[in-house]
Amino acid sequence: MLAFRLARGAHPVVQLRRLLVAAASAGTGFLLLCTLTYAMEHPGAGAGLRLAWCAAPIAATVYFAVAVARTDPGTRPRSGLSAVGLGPARLMVLGTISTAVACTLGSLLALLFFLHLRGDVSGLPFDGAAADLLAADRPLPVAAALTLLALVPIAASAASAFVLRPRSTKTTARAGGIARGPRTGPVTAAASRPGTEPESESAPPARAEPGTQPAAPTPPPSGLPWGVALLAAGLAVETYTSRSGTTPRTGFPLPGSADGSPAGVLAGWALTALGLVLAGPGLTYLCGRLLQAVRPGALRLLAGRVLQEEARRIGRPLGVVCAVASGAYASIVLYAGPRPEAGPLTTLGALLVGGCAVLTLATASVEARQARSDTTSALLRLGAPATMLRGSAVLRAGALLAVFGPLTWVVAQLAALPLTP
């Protein structure tokens, strides 16, 4: 009941994000039900590959739902909530329930729309408009339909619970030979070891308040080498599959056709996308380093430091957008012609994956802006002009576009090259 009350009293922007999650879940559920009807009419004729194609919309929807759960104000710890029993664990449960409710609502809408197009639910416009395509002459297996519709809510809820789980905080941090305690000032590493005496007992203690110590520099993400390796492996798998004769040289059939899709090419595209996602934080961190190179001014220094701090938060969504854009470009190049083979379900799946990727990046940007709100307020109090903050944002966007744009084009060209006639 508390989760419903928090959802009802949330900001309209938060409600809009939840509705977008429900819409993405509805689209994915509709694709799964259409795959079920295709398997009913064509048993053993590429139904498994069609279900494999649905893995991309499922992953995109779950990723977007997790990003919305992370930015939900109802899941943030607040002073006073722990006193009434709403600690981090309870807030995690509330966030999981909100995600499950939104995804379940979308799955129910998908089921109603699917039954309406089949003609099982009458009294509305377009009643039975797609009866021939959705196997209206065959009884719908209820257990299989409910199992497919439950995939997105269960996966999104489990992923949200994992991301929002309470994490233990360490009271002591060591960086560069300095040990910082919870209520004491910094002491040298030699003095902190047992059996050693400080150099001078009469020396005045360092005056340091809790929380005023300078933060250690953000370490670079460690996933860049693995991302490059997976990217190269994915391109190699695509090339080997296309040269081995399993892929027709006339093109790469999408789920809109009855021929299915080669499993090797699907695996290669999946490895390529995973490599871009893993390499995204490292590339974002490198963008911050490049902005601070060669005697930076205040503007470039601020933009570079912000990119370094936000590398892990926005790097993976940037990698996802890069992977989706490269896949879309490769598909457009492959199917350029007067009669493309992509059907309505393929278009719906592409819109779901692309829309969820862009919305996830936008949600991560909002989360990053909320995370640095205190720093922005401090800069404004110190007299920093607002134009410098806006210029820093433009500079960050330009640096990311200058790095990820050519990378997307190169990956798209390399991914489409082995599959073109």
Image (cartoon, rainbow, N blue to C red):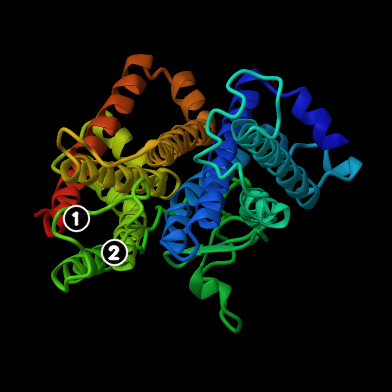
Q: CA distance from mark 1 to mark 2?
A: 9 Å
Q: Residue furthest bottom?
A: 195
Picture residue at 31% right of the left edge, 34% below the top: 303
Are the residues flagged by discs 1 and 2 in contact, CB closer than 8 Å? yes
Which residue: 53% across, 33% down? 130
Q: Quadrant of the N terminus?
A: top right
Q: In front: 155, or 47?
A: 47
Badge 1 marks a residue whose secondary structure is helix
Q: Residue at x 63, y 53 (%)?
A: 148
**Nearest to the observer: residue 320 or residue 125:** 125
Mark 2 lies on a secondary structure that is: helix
Q: Residues within 10 Å of mark 1 (few under 14, many from 20)?
A: many
Q: Position of residue 155 (x, y in %)?
A: 62, 54
Tag 2 or tag 1, which sits nearer the N-term? Answer: 2
| Amino acid at the residue labelled 2 | Gly
Kindly identify the amino acid type of the residue bearing the numbered disc 1. Answer: Ala
Residue occupied by mark 1: 415
Rendered location of residue 358, percent (x, y): 40, 35
Q: How many marks?
A: 2
Above or below, comparing residue 206 to residue 361 in the picture: below
Point out which mark residue 235 bears: none
Q: Quadrant of the C terminus?
A: bottom left
Please give the label number shown on residue 268: 2
Q: Residue furthest front?
A: 137
392 is higher (above) or lower (below) than 98: above
Between 407 and 223, the residue placed more toward the observer is: 407
Q: Is 324 situated left or right of 70 in this image?
A: left
Give coordinates of residue 48: x percent, y percent: 46, 63
Say if residue 201 shows up in the picture. Answer: yes
Classify residue 291 as left or right of residue 258.
left
